[in-house]
Image (spheres, coloured by chain):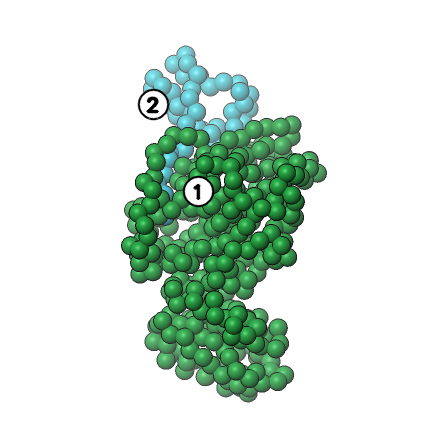
């Protein structure tokens, strides 16, 4: 898993596209982290053909200590110094194929939700068939066997003009399994036919810890999963309902537990909420729509940084980045969600 | 009970399935009994 350091002096003068093309030949198809680290030539401009070359790099590109933000934005990531790069480099080395795939997916993500979801699902399924996910499956402790419980995963109640959807698998931190997906899909489809604001919240200690790990590795195959994912897409329905959707988050909001809420036009979080995207550690990318929804909220560079580091962020960082719109004390979460929903009527 | 657009109903007696293409009030009956709403088939995990 090569990490290649390139002197930013390559951007001084008109030869950058040729140098980058030669560099790509050298990579030979290996998933690579390209660090542009060194003295940046003063006053450089990234001309259109260099910009195109950077956009077409089949590698994860990082600008280290680039003084010009406009130049830094032409790379997948920009970090202030080598120390800031270290945790991202660890993430890359754990899953180089997933890292490069994530960079490629985010770099040219389409604006259209459906197109973005199809692209994300395709990448996710490729990685399901890849060596990194397989290694993760083999290395993990045997998961708790998926309990065949018939309990309802979701309830819907109507309070005046507002519908409230509650995730009811609180004892499992609302782990998102196929049953929850199916029930949520059915409920959202019903609500699409009814006017009025919709509040979504979770029972128990967390909004949602994300995909149910007990189900990971259970799919019939990557291509079957791809078609299945875009057949029953909760993300697509949430995106359609977004203007009248208020999501109230608390506790763990991990993976799908933040990817899905991020579609809502109003995302409020209790001060207890924390957020992380651990997919890359499994050799995967987000698969519940996060490369569309979270990218729109926080931008591609910060999303990629969260994926590579796998770090958990608190509500202050989430608020500052735009991942959530508002932070309130836990005791006020539900009331505040209702107040916002009321204002939508 | 209002019949929602896109909902499917089946008859317990025969093979008849109805897809609601225009929402409205009223109940759907077949063979003298209320038709049952058809839920979407549970699908496996995609993970």
Marks 2 & 1 on one chain: no
Local SS, label 2 = loop
Alpha carbon distance from label 2 to label 1: 35 Å
Asked whether residue A188 appears in the rendered view, the answer is no
| Chain in cyan in the render | B
Q: Give residue B20's position: percent from left, percent from top.
A: 48, 28
Check contact, mark 2 vs mark 1: CB within 8 A.
no
Q: Give residue A247's position: percent from left, percent from top.
A: 58, 42
Mark 2 Cα-neighbour bin, 10 Å: few <14, some 14–19, many ≥20: few
Q: Colour of chain A?
A: green
Of badges 2 and 1, the one in the foreground is: 1
Residue A162 falls in which quadrant of the image? Answer: top right
- Name the residue beneath numbered marker 1: A176
Check the picture and name the quadrant holding the C terminus of chain A.
Answer: top right
Q: Residue at x 44, y 31 (%)?
A: A152
- Name the residue beneath numbered marker 2: B15
Q: Residue at x 37, y 35 (%)?
A: B42
């Amino acid at each position: 898993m090569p990490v290649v350091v390139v002197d930013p002096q390559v951007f001084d003068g008109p030869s950058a596209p040729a140098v980058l093309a030669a560099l790509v030949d050298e990579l030979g198809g290996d998933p690579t982290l390209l660090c542009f680290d060194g003295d940046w030539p003063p006053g450089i401009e990234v001309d259109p053909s260099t910009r195109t070359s950077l956009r077409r790099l089949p590698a994860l590109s990082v600008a280290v200590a680039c003084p010009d933000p406009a130049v830094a934005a032409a790379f997948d990531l920009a970090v202030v110094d080598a120390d800031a790069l270290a945790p991202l480099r660890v993430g890359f080395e754990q899953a180089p194929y997933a890292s490069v795939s994530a960079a490629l997916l985010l770099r040219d993500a389409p604006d259209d939700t459906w197109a973005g979801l199809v692209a994300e699902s395709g990448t996710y399924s490729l990685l399901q068939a890849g060596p990194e996910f397989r290694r993760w499956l083999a290395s993990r402790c045997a998961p708790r066997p998926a309990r065949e419980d018939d309990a309802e995963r979701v309830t819907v109640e109507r309070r005046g003009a507002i519908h409230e959807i509650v995730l009811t698998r609180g004892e499992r931190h609302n782990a998102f399994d196929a049953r929850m997906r199916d029930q949520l899909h059915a409920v959202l489809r019903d609500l699409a036919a009814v006017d009025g604001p919709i509040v979504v919240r979770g029972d128990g200690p967390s909004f949602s810890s994300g995909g149910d790990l007990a189900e990971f590795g259970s799919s019939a195959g990557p291509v079957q999963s791809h078609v299945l994912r875009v057949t029953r897409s909760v993300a697509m329905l949430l995106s359609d309902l977004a203007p009248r959707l208020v999501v109230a988050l608390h506790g763990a909001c991990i993976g799908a537990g933040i990817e899905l809420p991020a579609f809502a036009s109003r995302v409020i979080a209790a001060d207890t909420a924390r957020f992380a995207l651990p997919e890359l550690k499994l050799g995967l990318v987000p698969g519940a729509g996060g490369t569309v929804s979270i990218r729109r909220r926080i931008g591609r560079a910060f999303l990629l940084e969260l994926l590579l580091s796998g770090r958990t962020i608190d509500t202050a960082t989430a608020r500052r980045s735009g991942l959530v719109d508002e932070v309130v004390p836990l005791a006020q979460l539900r009331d505040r969600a209702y107040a916002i929903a009321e204002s939508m009527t | 009970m209002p019949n929602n657009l896109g909902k499917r109903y089946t008859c317990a007696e025969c093979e008849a399935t109805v897809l609601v293409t225009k929402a409205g009030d009223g109940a759907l009956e077949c063979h003298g009994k209320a038709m049952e709403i058809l839920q979407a088939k549970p699908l496996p995990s995609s993970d």
